[in-house]
């Protein structure tokens, strides 16, 4: 997706996953407008466009930079397992099945296998039904954040649940002098950077020790040579 945003819906009557959802459905982020027969044609058109309950249950939102559709291309029957609706004017780059198989299939299969293994082995998903796990496998996305990136800022609306696969994260909070304004961030801190620093320090220490040993050996040899020459 180059521009815009899109919403994902799943019709559980078609996917056979009625038992994986709670009784109260998640509200769609778009507002459903009642259609007034006397309203203008443009208003009636917008109202019909925003009544998306016919597509099923709202699952998630895709924004600029996200991709979708690879799960169906990896499956045997190639059947789409969700409906994706543009929530605003969008620009896309589309890759057909042939090009996908030649250039991206192996990478996508490896990433999808990692996600499936994570869902199957993580304690958080242990008691969930197989159908719901399958839905998670289609929804989870692996993302990378460089060192010192801000992942979550206090006060912003929650939109996702994060699982740290590698490295670590730190949380900090602060408040103003009046106590009425608070801000907090969760940022990434890379343990691999600390490991690299430790390795560099160890290497430097080893080099210094070797140099000292060489100097001592040279001095001893010089002294021995002088003693031998005097004796001779």
Image: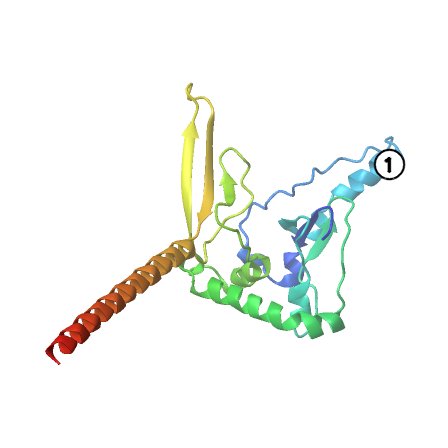
Residue 56 position, x and y percent, is: 67, 52
Up-down: is 150 above or below 198? above
Q: Residue at x 61, y 69 (%)?
A: 107
Q: Which residue is drawn at 17% across and 73% down?
A: 226
Residue sitting nearer the eye, 36 or 140: 140
Side (left or right) of 211 relative to 147: left
Q: Name the residue under label 1.
A: 42
Would you identify the image quadrant in which residue 47 lies?
Answer: top right
Up-down: is 132 above or below 101? above
Would you identify the image quadrant in which residue 232 lies?
Answer: bottom left
Residue sitting nearer the eye, 173 or 190: 190
Q: How crowded is mark 1: few (under 14 residues within 10 Å), some or many (20 or more)?
A: few
Which structural element holds mark 1?
helix
Residue 121 position, x and y percent, is: 43, 65
Residue 230 position, x and y percent, is: 13, 75
Up-down: is 73 above or below 162? below
Up-down: is 189 above or below 46? below
Q: Residue furthest top?
A: 178
Side (left or right) of 215 relative to 193: left
């Amino acid at each position: 997706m180059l521009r815009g945003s899109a919403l994902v819906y799943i019709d559980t009557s078609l996917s056979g996953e009625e038992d994986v959802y709670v009784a109260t459905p998640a509200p769609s982020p778009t507002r459903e407008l009642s259609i007034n027969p006397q309203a203008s044609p443009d208003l009636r058109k917008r109202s019909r466009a925003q009544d998306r309950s016919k597509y099923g249950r709202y699952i998630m939102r895709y924004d600029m930079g996200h991709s979708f559709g690879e799960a169906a291309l990896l499956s045997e029957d190639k059947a789409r397992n969700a409906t994706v609706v543009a929530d605003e004017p969008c620009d896309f780059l589309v890759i057909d099945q042939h090009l996908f198989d030649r250039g991206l299939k192996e990478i996508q299969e490896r990433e999808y296998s990692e996600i499936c293994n994570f869902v199957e082995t993580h304690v958080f998903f242990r008691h969930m039904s197989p159908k719901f796990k399958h839905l998670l496998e289609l929804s989870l996305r692996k993302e990378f954040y460089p060192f010192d990136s801000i992942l979550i800022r206090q006060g912003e609306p929650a939109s996702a649940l994060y699982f740290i696969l590698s490295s670590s994260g730190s949380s900090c909070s602060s408040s103003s002098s009046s106590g009425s304004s608070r801000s907090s961030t969760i940022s990434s801190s890379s343990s691999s950077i600390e490991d690299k620093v430790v390795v560099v320090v160890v290497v430097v220490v080893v080099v210094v020790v070797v140099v000292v040993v060489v100097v001592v050996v040279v001095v001893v040899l010089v002294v021995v040579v002088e003693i031998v020459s005097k004796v001779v």
